[in-house]
Image (cartoon, helix red, strand yellow):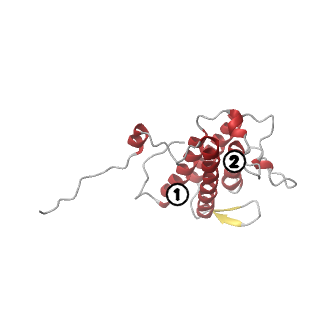
Amino acid sequence: MTTTKSPHTGTEKEILLHSMERHRTAVRWKLEGLDDEQLRRQLVPSGTSLLGLVKHLAAVEYGWFCETFGAKSEPLPFDDDDTDADLRVEPGETTADLLAFYDRACAAANAVIVSTDLDATGTSWSGAEVSMRWVLVHMIEETARHAGHVDILRELLDGMTGDHDRSPAADAATAEPTGTAPETSV
């Protein structure tokens, strides 16, 4: 996942996918520089952790994009008897494994997005018929919501804020073209 220039004049799908990637990238960036203990630390009464949010996001990427549209998925950590199972990091789950799970889920979701028309429909986990357009908008909302949670948890850990790397090198790599200044009369 990399941040690229926004397709301000792209197709609807390009714009939606760019928005999705921007939030995914923010989530991954917020995890950089933290050790396993920090990623697992539960900082709020609900028990939410950074790594738990990543596990949840991976599961919903597979669930909403792959399972809804009939694409291959991995076994997902959902449990009808435990609504928080997909948010909880189990002792045997490693940081590397869960980050790789998220990366695979995003790659699989992107393959479905690219190959599926926005008006195509699939059947969601609840049995509802949903369009790819609806799923993309829903998952942008879902990912942005949890990116906000990730932002707050990271700030509680070490004070880091923001949604992307604001270093001069990063800004130059993703800067929008500036064009030329309009002529003015004096």
Give whichever of 129, 18 is nearer the camera. Answer: 18
The mark tally for this picture is: 2
Residue ranking furthest to the right: 81
Give whichever of 141, 147 is nearer the camera. Answer: 147
Q: Quadrant of the N terminus?
A: top right
Q: Residue at x 66, y 54 (%)?
A: 65
Give whichever of 94, 2 is nearer the camera. Answer: 94
The label nearer to you, 1 versus 2, is 2
Q: Position of residue 127 (x, y in %)?
A: 76, 64
In the rendered structure, which disc, 1 or 2, sits on the residue that comes first in sequence?
Answer: 1
Counting other residues with Cα less than 10 Å from the Cα at mark 1, is it few (<14), some (14-19), or many (20 or more)? some
Q: Quadrant of the C terminus?
A: bottom left
Give left or right: position of 38 versus 92.
Answer: left
Q: Residue at x 62, y 50 (%)?
A: 152
Residue ranking furthest to the left: 186
Q: CA distance from mark 1 to mark 2?
A: 22 Å
Looking at the rendered structure, the kind of residue marked 1 is: Leu
Q: Position of residue 25 (x, y in %)?
A: 55, 45
Q: Residue at x 23, y 55 (%)?
A: 181
Position above or below: 62 against 123: above
Looking at the rendered structure, the kind of residue marked 2 is: Leu
Q: Residue at x 72, y 61 (%)?
A: 124
Give whichever of 124, 53 is nearer the camera. Answer: 53
Tell me the number on the disc at residue 98: none
Residue under label 1, please give it: 16
Q: Secondary structure at mark 2?
A: helix
Tell me the number on the disc at residue 53: 2
